Amino acid sequence: MKALIPVEMIEKKILLIRGEKVMLDADLAELYGVETKMLVRAVKRNIDRFPADFMIQLNREEFENLRFQFGTSSRWGGRRYLPYAFTEQGVAMLSSVLSSKRAVQVNIAIMRAFVKLREMLATHKDLARKLNAMEKKYDAQFRVVFDAIRQLMIPPSPKKRKIGFQREGH
């Protein structure tokens, strides 16, 4: 069965705020196919299901940082309140609040994205730990090799696309 929403698309919507991996109310609403205000209204009707470790409301500085990071798009326009951010547990709880078939399928996809992200982070930490152990075991002549491997472990920075037309031969 084809996934309702590609895991890669969901992974891009997982942010790190206050040291927690979270998803914003607007991004979740988009995935669930509902308006953000409807999602927030459903959460507020069931607020006892969303303790502080499930959901946080961003403060003004965090919101401004996000706006700066993502640019001023229509995505942020018209908000009367600061966005809510949901942890993995909060997203799981949303499936009990939003009980449509789409919500259940979207939640399954989101849970898989969180698990995949956690596995990638664990693998990266394990690789770094093994590399450190090997480096201690071998002498300085291999330091160049270890440094090269560390450079390969650094994620690439996003490439900036050139604006304008490129003429052939130039």
Image (cartoon, helix red, strand yellow):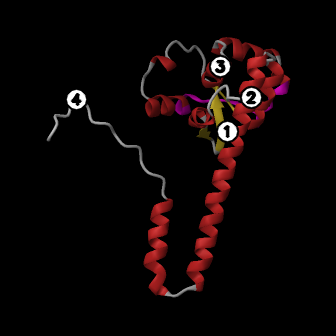
Nearer-N-terminus badge (2/4): 2
Distance from Cα at disc 3 to Cα at disc 4: 35 Å
Q: Which residue is mark 3?
A: 29
Start and end of the magenta stretch? Answer: 49-62
Nearer-N-terminus badge (2/1): 2
Distance from Cα at disc 1 to Cα at disc 4: 36 Å
Element under label 1? helix
Q: Which residue is mark 2?
A: 107
Q: Which residue is mark 4?
A: 164
- Using the image, determine if residue 71 lies above or below residue 150: above
Q: Please tell me which residue lies in front, 46 or 112.
A: 112
Nearer-N-terminus badge (3/4): 3
Judge whether residue 58 can be spotted in this image.
yes
Quadrant for the C terminus in the image: top left
Nearer-N-terminus badge (3/1): 3
Dividing the picture into quadrants, the one containing residue 114 is top right
**Residue 81 x/y as whole percent:** 60, 17
Distance from Cα at disc 3 to Cα at disc 1: 17 Å
Q: Which residue is mark 1?
A: 113
Q: Please tell me which residue lies in front, 115 or 82.
A: 115
| 27 within the magenta span | no
Distance from Cα at disc 2 to Cα at disc 1: 10 Å
Q: Please tell me which residue lies in front, 46 or 91.
A: 91
At a point 61% along the width and 19% down the height, the residue shown is: 30
Three-letter code, disc 2: Asn
Distance from Cα at disc 2 to Cα at disc 4: 40 Å
**Image check: 24 left or right of 165?**
right
| 50 within the magenta span | yes
Answer few, some or many: residues within 10 Å of disc 1's Cα (few below 14, many 20 plus, some between 14 and 19): many
Three-letter code, disc 1: Ala
**Residue 21 x/y as whole percent:** 65, 41
